[in-house]
Amino acid sequence: MTQQVSPWTEIIKSVDSDFKQLAKSHNKVTWENECEYALQAVSKNTRLMQCNPVTVQESIKNVAAIGLSLNPAQGLAYLVPDSIKVGNQWQSVCQLRISFQGLVKLATDCGSIKLVRAATVRANDTFIFNGLFAEPVHTINSPFNENERGELIGVYCVAMTPDNVVLTEMMSWNEVLNIKAAAKTQNVWNQWTEEMAKKAVIKRASKQWPKTENMSRLEDTVSLLNKNEGSEEIVNGSALAGQIDDLVNLGATFEGVMNSLQADGLEISADDQDYIAESLSKKLYAEQEAKAMDIINWVKSEIQEGRTDLAISTFVTYHPKLQEIAIKKASQKTVGMTKKEFMQLVNEERAEQQANSGDY
């Protein structure tokens, strides 16, 4: 074991300076402690040793950024091995997992609320909702027998602001199951379903909590959780939005996304198919827009260097129907132009050609 852990000592300690720089903003964690906790986590988990070292380093830097300790006794944050599919291959990666207790600590640390609690509700519990600004009544009639409590039907979160205002957020269990279906971490949800449900309702509730100067730590943590685990919101009616986005970003076609989801045993609804098409369209548009901006930037630089003829002739090769752009007019107008102004000129020339030819 010592021979295996030894390289990791160097890998982990290499983020020393980055960690200290990130932790300066809040001073909630120290490098000495977190380095030791990280080494302990790796030494006790052979799957972590198989992870891409860069993902372990990034996870440790995230500890510094959000200020939650890896101290196992506190149970706030953990280094967790996971697998992601890249193309046709699975890769082992490390991710920083934040418990719902970690979210609670961040919320109270930032001063937005002074206390918060979350709990699941089962069919045979007594639950009375008293409004968004009052604490609900939740009585567990069989506290020591989960079977007698019945199936899970919901989850809720109650927070109290520094001014003693009570804020309540609830989710039905159907909402929770939709969020679970869209999650990127199915194995985590399967093992700790109720804990993940509490995290989901706390994330949603936090959007309504009072904003403070120190709120960025909580907001950054929620963003990190959404990136690694999936959002607590369902996008455009698709319960598979997280998986679809990952596949589209990896370059999968419509058929490729469908085949991959079906291979994972997932049921694909009409909403899911609409979301696949929408995601592919957005990606294509973004790629075309980026290419257009590259061309425009090049044209602008050529014009500023006095090579207007070359710039315009090159530009129109990408836009054949703009061949009639007057080089003299362009050279007079484009020096020092912004991107928006340049495109406005192109549109003006396009409109002029349409008016003259009647066919564009």
Image: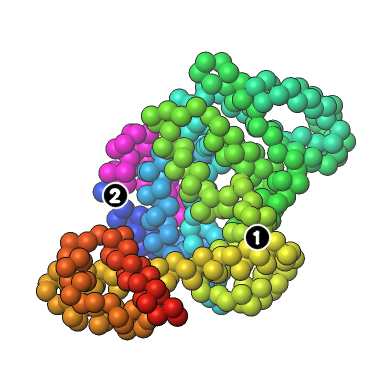
198 sits left or right of 334 in the view: right
| Image coordinates for residue 33, horizontal then vertical, percent | 37, 40
Q: Could you tell me if the residues under marks 1 and 2 are in contact, i.e. CB atoms within 8 Å?
A: no
Report whether residue 285 is seen: yes
Q: Which residues are magenta?
A: 18-46
Please tell me which of labels 1 and 2 falls first in the chain.
2
Q: Residues within 10 Å of mark 1 (few under 14, many from 20)?
A: many
Q: Which residue is at a point 69% across and 34% down the rendered structure image?
A: 170
The part of the image, by quadrant, that contains residue 330 is bottom left
Q: Main secondary structure of the magenta part?
A: helix
Mark seen at residue 240: 1
Q: Which residue is mark 2?
A: 18
Q: Which residue is at a point 26% across and 68% down the rendered structure image?
A: 297
Q: Which residue is at a point 40% across and 80% down the rendered structure image?
A: 357
- Identify the image quadrant of the C terminus: bottom left
* Residue type at numbered disc 2: Asp
| Image coordinates for residue 359, horizontal then vertical, percent | 45, 80
The part of the image, by quadrant, that contains residue 341 is bottom left
